[in-house]
Amino acid sequence: MAKFLVKLQRYFRRKPVRFFTLLALYLAAGSLVFLHSGFTGEPTVTGSQRSPGAGEGPGLPYLGVMQLSRGFKAMAAMPEGGRRHRPRFKNTSKEPAERGKAGDYGSTRSRTLRGRSGREKEEDRARYIGCYVDNTRRRTLRGVSFFDYKKMTVFRCQDNCAERGYLYAGLEFGAECYCGHKIQASNASESECNMECKGERSNICGGINRLSIYRLELAQESARRYGSAIFRGCFRRPDNVSIALPVSQLMLNMSVDKCVDFCTEKEYPLSALAGTTCHCGFPTTLFTLHEREDEQLCAQKCAGEEFESCGSAEYLLVYQTQVQDNRCMDRRFLPTRAKQLVALASFPGAGNTWARHLIELATGFYTGSYYFDGSLYNKGFKGERDHWRSGRTICIKTHESGQKEIESFDSAILLIRNPYKALMAEFNRKYGGHIGFAAHAHWKGKEWPEFVANYAPWWATHTLDWLRYGKKVLVVHFEDLKRDLFVQLQRMVGLLGITACEDRLLCVEGQKDGNFKRSGLRKLEYDPYTPEMRKMISGYIKTVDTALKLRNLSGVPDDYYPR
């Protein structure tokens, strides 16, 4: 053996190039093996399909939207017939499929055991109760939901649900969090909850159409029962109340909490108090919540709580419960390639992401982007990864303002916002993220003056360029959209060539905020604009106002002035 090694050493001394070539090949082979093992178990798309109606029962009215297709960039367009592609785990084993199935149990079991060890550590704040079946058309947990395809953890989901007063938190597909007061589905095998959390590989976050559900032990009783019901106002009793609000209960000892509790238990988003009767339902064309009455008409005292008002037989006091209205939550890619490219154009900070959220809920189709923002994709904007010319999305987000870029689109929704608000919003996004805030040092340092000097002229030229070069431009003011969402969203959906379903738009009104709304808790205590800045920006406002009126459009809203 020693002689062989000496000969090998002499050989490579004479021919060092061959030695280094062999070494490089060895290292490359090792790297490929490492990478291959790292991708084992990642979700991929397969052709296997499932009928969307499977496992469903009577439930929420369905408003003509296909199921949410889970997957990544390799996902194909939705096939005809309403079926959807299901992701699966790729089997990288070289052995026959039969043996792969047997071996899969061991890896799943080990992951489940790891998940259980993590769950035991969570016992002080939540108790794991099992793996449950979920359905995209009729959710197992029907409260608030949110997605994060990059940083989802068990604690984050539990914390968000507990903060909103829910009893249960469920994780699905490694990245989706659902909250609810009641579990409305059957148990599944623990081996079917087999997907690791995107934000912590040591814990399990459900599976494909499977929820890992926790009961939140430390939620306050008052928060659990009543949570954060939102007061919607006083409204006249609808003509046919039994159809408009299909569930009711006589409560001789009526209080706001009792009625909200009852409707939450029945899984309805609206709770309407009518003296000693509690009504539950959805906002519909029969009960739109658009025509509020004087609150004094609903000032009749509650029988069970003298300091609360409970409405009357003719005037209902309405609260929005924590139950999420799922009639407008399912989204998909366009079933056929779009013939026209529609831009959703705005200056940065003008509310483009919020408008995308509204459009996706109103139409049931994903929106695309001229750019790629990983944080938006991870929050559920699945069209973010598609090329903007793919034709699979209903409209395309863009902040571009050059002639060539504008003329690439066949039509556009031009979203305009008060420049004072838009500049501050974009500055916060630039230095604090989509829902964060810039630090005090940034506002007081050189960053803010430089930002205003560079971005304020762009606010004006962006609008002027789209008015000049854009084809079929619909102007929507951010302030009008906030003030009259239903009407403005109807206009926007009309330009997209979609017939707006009124019940769906009413559903959107109840889910309008989405995941990209700043809390407002860290508003500046002073005006960051100097007199010189205000003078410059006021000039740009007048220029844009004049340009709009020259095209027979309404000028900028009154609240842009005075500054």
Image (spheres, helix red, strand yellow):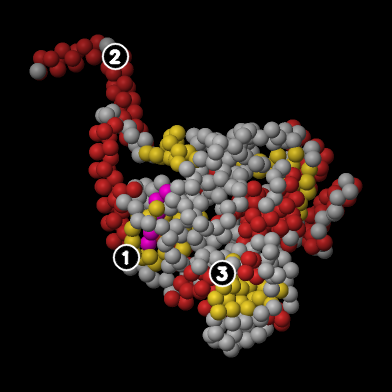
User: In the image, which is nearer the foreground, mark 1 or mark 2?
Assistant: 1
Element at badge 2?
Answer: helix
Residue drawn at 13 percent across, 15 percent down: 4
Instruction: Establish if 174 lies above or below 7.
Output: below
Tell me the magenta residue range: 209-214
Dot 1 alpha-carbon crowd within 10 angstroms: few under 14, some 14 to 19, many 20 or more: some
Element at badge 1?
Answer: loop
Looking at the image, tell me whether mark 1 or mark 2 is earlier in sequence order.
Answer: 2
Residue drawn at 24 percent across, 34 percent down: 99
- Say if the magenta span includes residue 210: yes
Residue under pointer 3: 247
Looking at the image, tell me whether mark 2 or mark 3 is earlier in sequence order.
Answer: 2
Q: Are marks 3 and 1 in contact (CB under 8 Å)?
A: no
- Residue type for callout 3: Val
Instruction: Name which quarter of the figure residue 511 lies in.
Output: bottom right
The label shown at residue 18 is 2
- Residue type for callout 2: Arg
